[in-house]
Image (cartoon, rainbow, N blue to C red):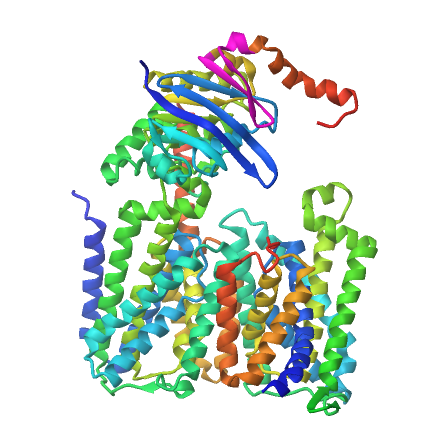
């Protein structure tokens, strides 16, 4: 029986009267790549924020490796094994690439020498080794996305949350990133990934979850989900509703 | 050849500086020497919170005043000897920072600046109205006048402060974590950093040495009053020196303090009638530095070196065969 | 003690008027330019001194120098704003904080300049209205309403009215509000950002300087009074909610009332202490202001 890394139990996140995430429940098994898709505004990033501790769920429970972590702060979750990237990449611009990863390495390796060693490892793993001393602000978008992933990897997470790490990259860079993601999975990290680029997410996910208006409307293997009527309506339905003149 | 570790360099430099009062015994010179050291201490501690952590403490001087008054009160009213009184001054400043820091550090950027400024002015008003602090007339301390003694004490205090800050900021993970908070506080949460805790540590760490320095000041100058110890001028000058020198490094504020203090002394010597002119220069210096040299003197130099190195590396990479 | 209550209230309202003008300009500056000007107190102080100088030279009532003060300072602000803008759009360091430090430096320079030129002594501006007051007897209550303070209130309301009209009913005001909400979009819509921002800053500086004339006449003038005034401005604006203009009148009058109550019921030397402590406490409890609408 494979280990359950993450479990969401009827999690809701409300902002005033708006339910950004509405009673979502699912599990992620160890070693899986679970894809999270849905139209814009479906609540995917909000869900990520809840799982990584940036938002406290209004209702429901989140369990990490069997332990209840609902409402814990982001740094506590990082210590417990959650790593994440941000949709709008947030490098520490005033620091070098190495320093960015180094800061994250301190979580598991509080001593300088070991942290540095870990940071070098992560740099090599993500292909950033040559740019180690460059200021992070000088990286291209592809570089920054890699740095983002590197920072999360330095935490040695059990669960990695990837938020649109392929969007905005050209096809070559995109493929390289996908290879990196697969390499990460091979090293034993469970991945929850949000992505708009369908060919990517359909290809690498073992399972897919679909959100629409904060609710989970489908879950299953990529082929199943792609043919699910509700999913198709969710993506195309807005368009046809708009054509009919109604407001979504 | 084995590299000499930084802490050893620092100790050697402090030791070498300690020989200066042996050689140069002129009382006036020793006064300047002691005061220059004092400003170095004030500037590097301000930089800890401003440059490394990214929070503007416009009430930095409040620790100085609290240290000065604590020591003065203990020495004059409770008969304490100087040493313990100075330590108590540091502890008092640290306690104030601990209590005030926790709510104040929750404030963002400008609010934090205003909050610390308000706190400083409030404490100054307190010193002005309370009788047992001497009110606006201040307090006199016993006239212990020994220039060499104070030169060495100040050197010891500031040297120890510099060494401590160096170890915490440049050698330990603490410094880099603070910088991460400075760059992106929200993002730093995701990599396991607890900003509230670290900010408070930085704030208290910047207050304690300043409290001790304030205590030394009180015993040295033998007279303190609310305006000279809790007024804006302490903070203002520390700010100029740190910014002019370069925020985010420890060497920057040292250079800034020395340069600016030298300028101030020269200025005073030749234009002593125009003391208020100094304020104008101070203000313009801050404004001009922010405008022309946002990285400060040392910062600009350091960046140029970095740039040159990166350029060299870039050129080296460019020569590699295409992958 | 209760017999002093109506006077305390009147005084508070009148004081509030002054704070209103200080805060309106400052809040406008923040709301549109996103700059916290640490020199606001100095602008007020300089306005008072310029009025003093002009009225002494020309042997006229300082109140008559109001238009001159406004024009001069609005021009200064207009010319200064591009410099501020350059600091704000710097690529290195944290521009917003650096802008703060910049205005902090300017404040120091102005203070030093004023101290150099005018010395350390406190003066006061004598105007035609400075001496007189209305005395109202009502049962056992006895109220004094000094003319000059009443004039201050009238001035405050006039400025508030003018600014509100400007912002709500003119094209310029529309441009200003657009820039405040979304600079880029406003630029794309054809608003001249540079000129609008310069104009706003000039307006703010001009209004602050005019307020200085009243502060000088009602209270006193001193080259070192800038910081206290700045703190009052911060107090009002933080209490109102930074950038939230509608909150400013409420906060101003509240501050005026608090201050006058302290002045009447408390030892005057404790007033500043009490005020700064309250400011600190408010900041800590609710940095977004009493209506929680601050930015």
- Residue C164 placed where, x, y %? 77, 61
- Residue A31 placed where, x, y %? 36, 17
Is B237 included in the stretch rendered in magenta?
no
Is A205 included in the stretch rendered in magenta?
yes
Q: Looking at the image, is C188 positioned above or below residue C37?
A: above
Residue sitting nearer the eye, A225 or B195: A225
Q: Is residue A165 left or right of residue B317?
A: right
Residue sitting nearer the eye, C96 or C5: C5
Q: Residue at x 19, y 64 (%)?
A: B16
Q: Residue at x 63, y 75 (%)?
A: C256
Q: Is residue B100 left or right of residue A142?
A: left
Q: Looking at the image, is A77 positioned above or below residue A194?
A: below
- Residue A170 placed where, x, y %? 54, 20
Residue sitting nearer the eye, B91 or A114: B91
Q: Is residue A43 left or right of residue C142?
A: left
- Residue B228 in view in this figure: yes
Give the residues drawn in magenta, as a range: A204-225
Q: Residue at x 66, y 57 (%)?
A: C244
- Residue B288 in view in this figure: no
Q: Looking at the image, is B167 positioned above or below residue B157?
A: above
């Amino acid at each position: 029986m494979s280990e359950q890394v993450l479990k969401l139990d009827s999690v809701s996140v409300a902002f005033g009267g708006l339910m950004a995430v509405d009673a979502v429940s699912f599990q992620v098994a160890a070693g899986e790549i679970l894809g999270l898709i849905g139209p814009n505004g479906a609540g995917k990033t909000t869900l990520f924020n809840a799982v990584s501790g940036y938002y406290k769920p209004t209702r429901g429970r989140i369990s990490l490796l069997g332990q209840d972590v609902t409402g814990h702060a982001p740094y506590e979750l990082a210590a417990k094994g959650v790593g994440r990237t941000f949709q709008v990449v947030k490098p520490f611009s005033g620091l070098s690439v190495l320093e960015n990863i180094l800061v994250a390495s301190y979580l598991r390796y509080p001593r300088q020498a070991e942290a540095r060693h870990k940071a070098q490892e992560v740099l090599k793993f993500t292909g950033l080794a040559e740019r180690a001393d460059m200021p992070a602000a000088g990286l291209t978008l592809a570089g920054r996305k890699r740095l983002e992933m590197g920072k999360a990897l330095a935490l040695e997470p059990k669960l990695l949350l990837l938020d649109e790490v392929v969007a905005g990259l050209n096809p070559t860079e995109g493929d390289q990133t996908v290879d990196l993601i697969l390499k990460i999975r091979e090293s034993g990290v469970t991945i929850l990934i949000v992505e708009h680029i369908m060919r990517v997410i359909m290809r690498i996910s073992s399972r897919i979850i679909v959100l629409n208006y904060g609710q989970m409307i489908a879950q299953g293997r990529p082929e199943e989900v792609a043919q699910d009527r509700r999913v198709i309506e969710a993506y195309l339905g807005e368009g046809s509703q708009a054509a009919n003149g109604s407001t979504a | 050849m084995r590299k000499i570790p930084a802490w050893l360099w620092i100790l050697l430099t402090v030791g070498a500086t300690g020989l200066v009062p042996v050689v140069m015994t002129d009382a006036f010179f020793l006064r300047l020497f002691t005061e220059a050291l004092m400003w170095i201490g004030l500037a590097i501690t301000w930089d800890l919170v401003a440059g490394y952590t990214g929070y503007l403490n416009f009430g930095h001087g409040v620790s100085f005043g609290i240290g000065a008054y604590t020591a003065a009160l203990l020495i004059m009213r409770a008969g304490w000897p100087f040493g313990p009184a100075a330590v108590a001054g540091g502890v008092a400043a640290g306690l104030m920072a601990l209590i005030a820091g926790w709510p104040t550090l929750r404030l963002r950027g400008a609010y934090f600046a205003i909050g610390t400024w308000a706190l400083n002015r409030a404490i100054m008003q307190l010193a002005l109205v309370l009788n047992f602090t001497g009110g606006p007339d201040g307090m006199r301390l016993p006239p212990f006048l020994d220039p060499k003694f104070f030169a060495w004490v100040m050197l010891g205090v500031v040297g120890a402060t510099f060494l401590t800050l160096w170890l915490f900021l440049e050698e330990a993970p603490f410094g880099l974590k603070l910088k991460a908070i400075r760059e992106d506080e929200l993002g730093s949460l995701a990599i396991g950093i607890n900003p509230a805790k670290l900010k408070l540590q930085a704030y208290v760490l910047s207050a304690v040495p300043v409290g001790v320095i304030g205590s030394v000041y009180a015993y040295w100058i033998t007279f303190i009053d609310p305006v000279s110890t809790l007024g804006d001028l302490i903070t203002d000058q520390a700010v100029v020196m740190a910014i002019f020198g370069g925020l985010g490094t420890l060497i920057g504020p040292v250079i800034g303090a020395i340069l600016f203090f030298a300028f101030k002394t020269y200025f005073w010597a030749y234009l002593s009638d125009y003391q208020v002119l100094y304020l104008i220069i101070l203000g313009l210096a801050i404004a001009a530095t922010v405008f022309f040299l946002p990285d400060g003197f040392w910062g600009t130099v350091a960046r140029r070196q970095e740039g040159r190195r990166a350029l060299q590396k870039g050129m080296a990479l460019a020569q590699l065969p295409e992958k | 003690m209760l017999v002093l209550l109506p006077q305390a209230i009147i005084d508070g309202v009148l004081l509030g008027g002054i704070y209103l003008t200080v805060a309106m300009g400052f809040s406008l500056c923040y709301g549109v330019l996103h700059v916290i000007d640490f020199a606001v107190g100095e602008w007020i102080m300089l306005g008072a001194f310029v009025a003093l100088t002009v009225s002494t030279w020309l042997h006229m009532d300082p109140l008559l120098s109001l238009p001159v003060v406004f024009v001069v300072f609005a021009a200064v602000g207009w010319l200064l704003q591009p410099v501020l803008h350059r600091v704000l759009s710097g690529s290195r360091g944290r521009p917003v904080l650096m802008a703060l430090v910049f205005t902090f430096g300017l404040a120091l320079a102005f203070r030093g300049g004023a101290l150099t030129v005018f010395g350390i002594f406190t003066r006061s501006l004598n105007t035609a209205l400075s001496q007189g007051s209305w005395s109202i007897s009502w049962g056992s209550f006895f109220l004094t309403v000094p003319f000059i303070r009443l004039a201050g209130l009238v001035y405050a309301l006039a400025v508030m009215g003018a600014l509100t009209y400007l912002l709500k009913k003119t094209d310029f005001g529309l441009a200003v509000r657009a820039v405040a909400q979304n600079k880029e979009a406003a630029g794309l819509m054809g608003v001249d950002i540079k000129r609008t921002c310069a104009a706003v800053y000039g307006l703010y500086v001009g209004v602050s300087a005019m307020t200085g004339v009243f502060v000088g006449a009602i209270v006193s003038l001193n080259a070192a009074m800038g910081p206290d005034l700045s703190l009052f401005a911060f107090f009002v604006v933080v209490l109102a909610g930074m950038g939230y203009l509608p909150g400013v009148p409420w906060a101003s009058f509240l501050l005026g009332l608090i201050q006058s109550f302290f002045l009447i019921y408390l030892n005057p030397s404790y007033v500043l202490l009490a005020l700064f402590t309250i400011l600190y406490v408010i900041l800590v409890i609710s940095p977004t202001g009493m209506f929680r609408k601050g930015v």
